[in-house]
Amino acid sequence: MNVLIIGGGGREHAIAWKAKQSSLVDNVYVAPGNPGMEEVATCIGLAESDHDALVQFAIQSDIGLTIVGPEAPLLAGLVDRFEEEGLPVFGPRQSAALLEGSKSFAKEIMTKYSIPTGKAKAFSDYEEAVAYVKQEGAPIVVKADGLAAGKGVTVALTEEEAIAALRHVLVESAFGEAGAQVVVEEYLEGEELSLMAFVSGNTVVPMVGAQDHKRAYDGDQGPNTGGMGAYSPVPQFKQADVERAVVEVLQPAADAMVKEGRPFTGILYAGLMMTAQGPKVIEFNARFGDPETQVVLPRLKSDLIDVMVKLLNGDKVELEWKQEAVVGIVLASVGYPGSYEKGVSIVGIEAAATKGLVFHAGTTKQGNVWQTNGGRVLLTAATGHSIADAQAAAYQAVKEIKSDGLYYRNDIAVKAMEAAKQHSTVVRRGV
């Protein structure tokens, strides 16, 4: 079949790369894609918001499956539109994608169906929100209710920081309509886990876990970003911890959406805090995580397209995984997640690709010269027998890339390496 992937970032590059390996696939198209994907897909110059043109392309090009990558077209009802035309599509309908599109809606679902999460309250009035922060105290979390490209969250360690975040969102309208309402949430203590699953109605097929690095700078310092790197597996957690998260969070969430008359089909992503009391939901996403996808899909032995087709047909799905670890490091534009310059030249991408995988997120090409064209620009990923091996290989690939316009964190997966070291010490002692 021919496959169409909607989107143009690193996540979509990884999906296209994996789709290209499928025995079921003839041609992979990406709309709009980016020049870095052209080795694995044909990029077509259609915006993800141009639903009419995408539908026409799918019909004319005999597309057997469309995969919607980003959240915005899901919330704009692109899946609904494809289904109306009788076109096979993998992703949640608009009504189900609201699980990501509105944090207050997600909290209501979790409360109603006893899915573990932090205490929270929604506000559209600045003064009321400030009063609540003063009542609850810090640390506390402030989130824009709608889509803010991973930048609408402030983990405030002081009341002053929380109040400044409320002003930024509600008074200064930093995120426009997405910040017309905020959710003020309990600060959860623990270790984060990103857990994605293939879902169709009540059927939940979990993937392996990953951990993302949200803060911009080393040592988890600086502002929140869409993600500066990721790794899988996450040695901080036992398999039993992951299974508990499936039983207590992912399955109940899928079941809840069916009961609400909003059955979910697609990728359900649970951003979890693994607390002393068990897993608690930080957020739900209605699609593959970015950058988690770039480290999870390289571990997937199974045919991605076969998995999606079977789910859509109601057939049984079992996933096979490689044992190796994968570490991915994001190279971002200097200034990201704030303002940054575009059009800065990049050299060494081809050399990096000989040492690992390189997924393009925000690049463009002028003649033979690569240039920056976004906040997160590239991700280098590498596989290894251990997290330490994968990390070393990923940083070797990074070091091949030279640009005055890029920066990256130097400590991706360090926490995991420490956890793996402790685990091996415990095993050697026979504990």
Image: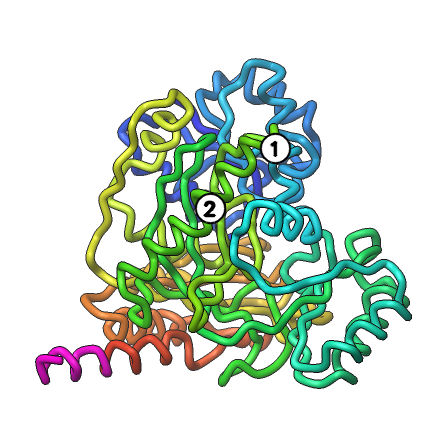
Mark 1 nearby-residue class (10 Å; few <14, some 14–19, many ≥20): few
Which residue shows up at 29% across the image and 28% down it? 316
Q: Is residue 166 left or right of residue 140?
A: right
Q: Nearer the viewer, residue 82 or 398?
A: 82
Q: Nearer the viewer, residue 248 or 379?
A: 248
Whole-percent x, y for residue 296 in the image: 36, 54
Disc on res. 260: 1
Q: Nearer the viewer, residue 315 or 324?
A: 315
Q: Nearer the viewer, mark 2 or mark 1?
A: 1
Check if mark 2's residue and mark 1's residue have beta carbons within 8 Å: no
Whole-percent x, y for residue 389 in the image: 23, 73
Name the amino acid type tagged 2.
Met
Name the amino acid type tagged 1.
Glu
Which stretch did the figure color magenta? 422-431
* Majority secondary structure of magenta residues: helix
Q: Earlier in the sequence, mark 2 or mark 1?
A: 2
Tally of numbered discs: 2
Disc on res. 37: 2
Q: Does the rendering let one see residue 412?
A: yes
Which residue shows up at 33% across the image and 66% down it? 234
Mark 2 nearby-residue class (10 Å; few <14, some 14–19, many ≥20): many
Which residue shows up at 40% across the image and 41% down it? 40
Whole-percent x, y for residue 106 in the image: 63, 49
**Relative to 139, does residue 235 appear above or below in the rendering?**
above
Marks 2/1: CA–CA distance: 38 Å
